[in-house]
């Protein structure tokens, strides 16, 4: 009833459904005797190379009394190594005309250098030093502890809505380590001894727990020789790797809370528990999220922002991780609109998905948006290297970079309705309202 | 690092309010040939103790796009790159900047409105069609762009052409955009960096120069839909536009599309303007914008310079800028002000080229007490980099870094297009970017020093300080004449301070106030009060009601379209506050504040509850002398009140509140006193912090027989 499709328009669009093909990303993959997985992708269009290492360790591998360790290492491992003095890693890369950075999630830690192609060996040297014998010393621990505290202040404590994921995940998960965020607890970092940091390094920063992924203007044969020269001697790790095997029970009823924060505007968030990444339902939720919030004609944007003007901004995103996921919808109420009314409107959008099958034309639009996004994804060398490493680490199949689109294509309108019915229910969600701290 | 916290921000919907003058492309890949010789000798054994030697540097060749001009004057550039099957087209205008005068902001509004529907497609239909193609379409004051997969590109391009050639300028969307612009301006008023930019531009370029203009709520209010239409019909002409294609498209196909969709676009005469060239001041001027609430000073030291993009000095100036005040922690300004002195989180400075007028500018934010020292350190660094050449190591390291970032920028094919556009717009030599790296390599320490001496003028600067004048102004006259400005960049009077005569007490000042508003007897006769008015909450006007049943019942309600969005109540010791329908917990300070408010006239409450009232000084408030009185209860927060010496009336009150970055002073002003049943009340109130910005009282009814049951 609400969807008045103009038939002529729909027909003329229906004929455009053939899609451009994403170019295939070619790569080579092999494993060194010490367990290090290597992925190489050659692209000579720019004289650049991205040297990246993805360690399969994130906050979910942490001890409950030592949260924040994985992210702390992302900082600590810029301190130096047996052969690199403190603070020199940055200088080497800067003087080579390159950039570097790192990031940590619940599931993995990722390091990269993007350098001119004649400096690939510099990247290999820095990464192999980090893997072989990084310096874990009290002075570096002390320094980085202060930096991480500043980071937490700046990004979480002092940022409007900065505690949002933390507040959401700790309510959505009661048992699984996803209940805490990578930034972790400053108390835990304060309490940890140097030996604990050394143990963590020796456990997780080993060749058999990571992927070396290189993309850019490389010569494959000589890159292989260099990789062997820098990495083959690094000993395989022998300590057991802790991988949580935790069955998180059902949420068992809606969780609601109000959070006071330094914000100008209230924010309403609904987070539904969903299956982990890579499952059929995961792909369905990605399609669902596009339907709800990609582009001006997406349902949440159109209904809440453009039409009723109840919301200043509204959107959704799937937050799926290796062991479990959330589907998050959110909106900021416009002046003079109550949070309750906004929540009712959001609920009615979700209910409509359960009651009414998505129309064919709208579904085609969403599929087109997904195809477009998939094709355009692999733009930068650093991005390609990271995607290859992610797919290999999580699914043992780097080639998903080329084939994952098939999984999106298999999603049907009925699937959308089915996941809406199965997951978008009150007893499966956390609802948080952020309100301005009163003066 | 640790970037997974930002999903929400990245997932925001398409932002249509991007302020952008020029190229906004997304892109993938490039039309550049590179020759690369990899270091070929490989040994199985590596020397781990040293960084590996780099191979020979790759030779970076910068390609040229295909280019042609349509008969109507539209200049077209095509960067063909088939790495990904997608195309971006971007149309941008190149006209002399316009003085928008008392309607500043109308071009921005026009840019936003263009994307909101065409003569044949409503906003809904347009949005629907763009999304169906999996495309992105954006418009700004001076540009329109579209991005789509190759096989949908023709259709997406047709939509962009429709938006550019047939905008509908729908009235309802115009009103929405205006409203959003006004609320975003509202949030800027709390932002010292925005104030600093406004004031600096106003005094450095002057109000008769396009760079000296800033939009304010007054100028935006005046914008009409006719202004928008007139702007469009005057300036959106093919003969001043560039159309750039980047991606999986041949020049031939691009030419076909450009001709088909833009070939009939009529050329027109676009007005040209010249402006007086702004000059550095003969002597340094210190410009203070007083923000009594500030805990930090935002400091900018700047002067206009004559430096055109692509001119001989542009590359040495870029090296100089990055050594002096680039983003690195190792820049000279950061090394000094951040690492050595710990005055600030970051200090920056640069010499910037511009077609009309360039600038030298350096800026930082420091805690109040370090304002003077920070300025001194800036000047020390300026003088040092003029007097002594930079070191060979600084220079070579910076050249490496800039060479790397130039090469990395070429990973995006749009870079080639923007190079070509720069060559056209700034009239650069055709091979400017091909020779960029060799010109960069040729810069020596002598050249860097020469440009430092030419563009850095420590004795001829505008030093703008947005901060608490009372705390930071002392001693600044040694840098130059000190002047005071308001938030919009108008000259204003210096805040002054005098001692209070010993015969005047806090109690006498408060009693004089009570007399001034009608006398204690008239106030004591008030049984109840019923007030109606309006309030501005973050740019939105709302209705406000207040009711009092003396001495201890009070309710304030703020309504939007008849719905209460905020309410606070005290009724005989029971307290309540709701925000957008949700009940809020109340702390003791808030409760004490409500008790005081319930007394209707706070000064009566002060005397009754034995507040300590201490006169501190006499200061000028908006040109009027006022007693500054510190008001303290036994418990609860202190406040500072300002009572006019001449009339006794209260002009303003400040309290200290905990804000995001420590203590913030909240200033409330009272004006337009009017008499109601023998009692004078201020009918206009402003508050400089928090969402409620002003209150205007329209109707006051006194002693009409309200009961405490009515307080709900």
Image: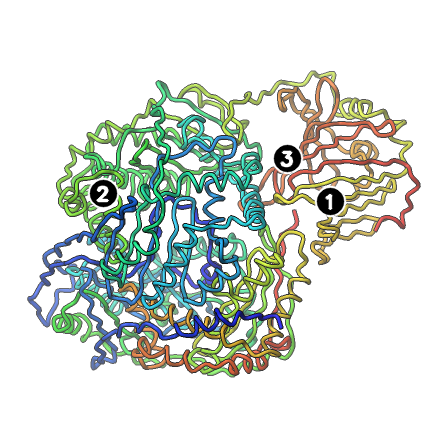
SS at mark 1 in the image: strand
Q: Position of residue A342 (x, y in %)?
A: 64, 62
Q: Earlier in the sequence, mark 1 or mark 3?
A: 1
Quarter-wise, where is residue B315 in the image? Answer: top left
Q: Is residue A43 left or right of residue B216?
A: left
In this view, B59 is above or below A120: above
Q: Residues within 10 Å of mark 2 (few under 14, many from 20)?
A: some
| Circles 1 and 2 on the same chain | yes
* Mark 2–mark 3 CB contact (< 8 Å): no
3D distance between C-alphas at marks 1 and 3? 22 Å
3D distance between C-alphas at marks 1 and 2? 55 Å
In this view, B335 is above or below B133: above
Between B266 and B300, the one lying in front of the other is: B266
Q: Residues within 10 Å of mark 1 (few under 14, many from 20)?
A: many
Q: Is residue B265 left or right of residue A24?
A: right
Q: Which residue is mark 1?
A: B543
In this view, B669 is above or below A83: above
Give the foreground label among 2 and 3: 2
| Circles 1 and 3 on the same chain | yes
| Host chain of mark 1 | B
In this view, A225 is above or below A144: below
Give the foreground label among 1 and 2: 2
Point out which mark residue B213 bears.
none
Q: Position of residue A419 (x, y in %)?
A: 54, 80
Point out which mark residue B423 bears.
2
Residue pictured at 69% horizontal, 24% vertical: B615
Q: Which residue is mark 3?
A: B667
């Amino acid at each position: 009833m609400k969807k008045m499709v103009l038939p002529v328009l729909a027909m003329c669009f229906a004929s455009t459904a053939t899609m451009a093909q994403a170019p295939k990303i070619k790569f080579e993959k092999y494993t060194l005797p010490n367990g290090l997985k290597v992925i190489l992708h050659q692209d000579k269009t720019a004289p650049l190379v991205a040297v990246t290492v993805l360690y399969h360790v994130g906050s979910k591998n942490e001890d409950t009394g030592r949260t924040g360790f994985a992210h702390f290492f992302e900082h600590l491992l810029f301190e130096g190594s047996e052969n690199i003095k403190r603070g020199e890693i940055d200088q080497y890369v800067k003087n080579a005309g390159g950039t570097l950075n790192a990031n940590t999630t619940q599931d993995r830690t990722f390091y990269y250098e993007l350098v001119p192609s004649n400096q690939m060996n510099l990247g290999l040297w820095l990464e192999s030093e980090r893997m072989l014998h990084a310096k874990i010393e009290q002075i570096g621990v002390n320094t980085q502890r202060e930096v991480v505290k500043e980071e937490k202040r700046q990004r979480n404590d002092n940022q409007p809505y900065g505690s949002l994921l933390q507040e959401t995940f700790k309510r959505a998960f009661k048992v699984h380590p996803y209940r805490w965020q990578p930034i972790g607890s400053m108390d835990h970092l304060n309490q940890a001894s140097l030996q604990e940091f050394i143990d963590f390094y020796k456990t997780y920063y080993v060749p058999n727990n990571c992927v070396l992924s290189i993309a850019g203007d490389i010569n494959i044969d000589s890159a292989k020789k260099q990789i062997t020269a820098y990495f083959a001697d690094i000993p395989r790790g022998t300590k057991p790797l802790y991988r949580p095997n935790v069955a998180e029970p059902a949420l068992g009823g809606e969780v609601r809370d109000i959070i006071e924060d330094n914000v100008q505007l209230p924010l309403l968030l609904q987070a539904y528990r969903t299956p982990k990444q890579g499952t059929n339902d995961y792909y369905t939720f990605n399609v669902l999220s596009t339907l709800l919030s990609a582009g001006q004609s997406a349902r949440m944007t159109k209904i809440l922002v453009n039409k009723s003007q109840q919301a200043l901004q509204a959107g959704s995103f799937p937050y799926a991780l290796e062991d479990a996921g959330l589907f998050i919808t959110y909106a900021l109420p416009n002046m003079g609109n109550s949070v309750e009314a906004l929540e009712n409107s959001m609920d009615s959008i979700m209910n409509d998905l359960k009651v009414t099958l998505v129309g064919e034309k709208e579904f085609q639009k969403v599929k087109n948006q997904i195809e477009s996004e998939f094709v355009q994804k692999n733009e930068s060398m650093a991005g390609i290297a990271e995607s290859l490493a992610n797919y290999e680490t999580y699914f043992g199949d780097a080639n998903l970079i080329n084939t994952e689109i098939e999984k999106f294509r298999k999603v049907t309108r009925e699937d959308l309705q089915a996941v809406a019915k199965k997951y978008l229910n009150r007893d499966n969600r956390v609802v948080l309202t952020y309100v301005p701290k009163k003066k | 690092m640790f970037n997974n916290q930002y999903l929400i921000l990245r997932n925001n919907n398409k932002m249509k309010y991007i302020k952008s003058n020029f190229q906004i492309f997304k892109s993938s890949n490039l039309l550049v040939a590179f020759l690369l010789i990899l270091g070929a000798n490989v040994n199985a054994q590596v020397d781990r103790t040293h960084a590996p030697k780099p191979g020979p540097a790759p030779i970076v060749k910068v390609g040229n796009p295909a280019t042609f001009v349509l008969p109507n004057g539209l200049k077209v550039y095509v960067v063909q790159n088939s790495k990904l099957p997608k195309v971006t087209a971007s149309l941008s205008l190149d006209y002399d900047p316009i003085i928008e005068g008392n309607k500043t902001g109308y071009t921005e509004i026009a840019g936003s409105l263009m994307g909101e529907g065409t003569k044949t497609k409503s906003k809904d239909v347009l949005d629907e069609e763009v999304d169906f193609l999996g495309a992105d379409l954006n418009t700004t004051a001076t540009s329109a762009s579209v991005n789509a997969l190759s096989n949908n590109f023709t259709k997406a391009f047709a939509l962009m052409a429709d938006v550019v050639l047939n905008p509908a300028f729908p009235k309802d969307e115009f009103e929405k955009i205006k409203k959003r612009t006004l609320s975003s301006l509202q949030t800027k008023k709390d932002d010292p960096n925005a104030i600093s930019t406004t004031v600096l531009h106003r005094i450095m370029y002057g109000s008769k120069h396009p760079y000296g203009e800033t939009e304010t709520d007054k100028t935006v209010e005046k914008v009409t839909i006719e202004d928008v239409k007139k702007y469009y019909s005057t300036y959106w002409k093919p003969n001043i536009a560039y159309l750039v294609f980047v991606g999986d498209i041949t020049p031939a196909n691009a030419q076909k599309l450009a001709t088909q969709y833009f070939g009939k676009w009529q050329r027109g005469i676009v007005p040209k303007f010249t402006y007086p060239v702004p000059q550095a001041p003969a002597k340094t001027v210190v410009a203070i914008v007083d923000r009594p609430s500030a805990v930090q000073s935002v400091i900018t030291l700047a002067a206009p310079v004559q430096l055109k993009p692509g001119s001989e000095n542009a590359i040495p100036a870029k090296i100089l800028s990055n050594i002096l005040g680039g983003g690195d922690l190792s820049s000279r300004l950061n090394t000094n002000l951040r690492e050595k002195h710990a005055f600030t989180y970051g200090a920056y400075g640069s010499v910037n080229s511009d077609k009309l007028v360039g600038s030298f500018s350096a800026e930082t934010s420091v805690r109040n007490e370090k304002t003077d020292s920070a300025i001194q350190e800036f000047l020390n660094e300026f003088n040092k980099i003029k007097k002594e050449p930079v070191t060979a190591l600084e220079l070579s390291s910076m050249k490496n870094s800039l060479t790397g970032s130039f090469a990395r920028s070429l990973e995006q094919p749009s870079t080639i297009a923007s190079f070509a556009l720069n060559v056209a717009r700034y009239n650069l030599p055709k091979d400017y970017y091909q020779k960029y790296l060799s010109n960069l390599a040729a810069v020596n320490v002598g050249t860097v020093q020469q440009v430092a001496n030419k563009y850095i003028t420590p004795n001829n600067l505008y030093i703008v300080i947005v901060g608490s004048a009372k705390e930071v102004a002392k001693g600044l006259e040694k840098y130059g004449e000190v002047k005071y400005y308001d938030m919009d960049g108008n000259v204003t009077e210096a805040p002054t301070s005098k001692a209070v005569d010993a015969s005047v007490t806090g109690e006498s000042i408060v009693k004089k106030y009570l007399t001034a508003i009608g006398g204690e007897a008239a106030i004591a006769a008030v049984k109840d009060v019923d007030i109606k008015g309006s309030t501005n909450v973050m740019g939105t006007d709302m209705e406000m009601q207040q009711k009092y049943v003396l001495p201890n019942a009070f309710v304030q309600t703020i309504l939007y379209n008849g719905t209460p969005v905020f309410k606070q109540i005290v009724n005989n010791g029971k307290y309540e506050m709701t925000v957008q329908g949700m009940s809020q917990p109340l702390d003791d300070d808030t409760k004490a504040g409500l008790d005081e408010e319930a007394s209707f006239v706070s000064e009566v409450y002060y005397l009754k509850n034995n507040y300590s009232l201490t006169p501190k000084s006499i200061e000028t408030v908006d040109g009027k002398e006022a007693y500054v009185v510190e008001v303290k209860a036994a418990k609860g927060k202190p406040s500072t009140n300002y009572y006019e010496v001449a009339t006794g009336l209260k002009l303003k009150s400040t309290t200290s509140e905990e804000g995001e970055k420590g203590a913030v002073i909240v200033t409330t002003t009272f004006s337009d006193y009017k008499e109601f049943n023998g009692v004078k009340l201020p009918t206009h109130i402003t508050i400089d912090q928090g969402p409620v910005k002003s209150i205007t009282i329209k109707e006051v009814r006194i002693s009409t027989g309200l009961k405490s049951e009515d307080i709900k």
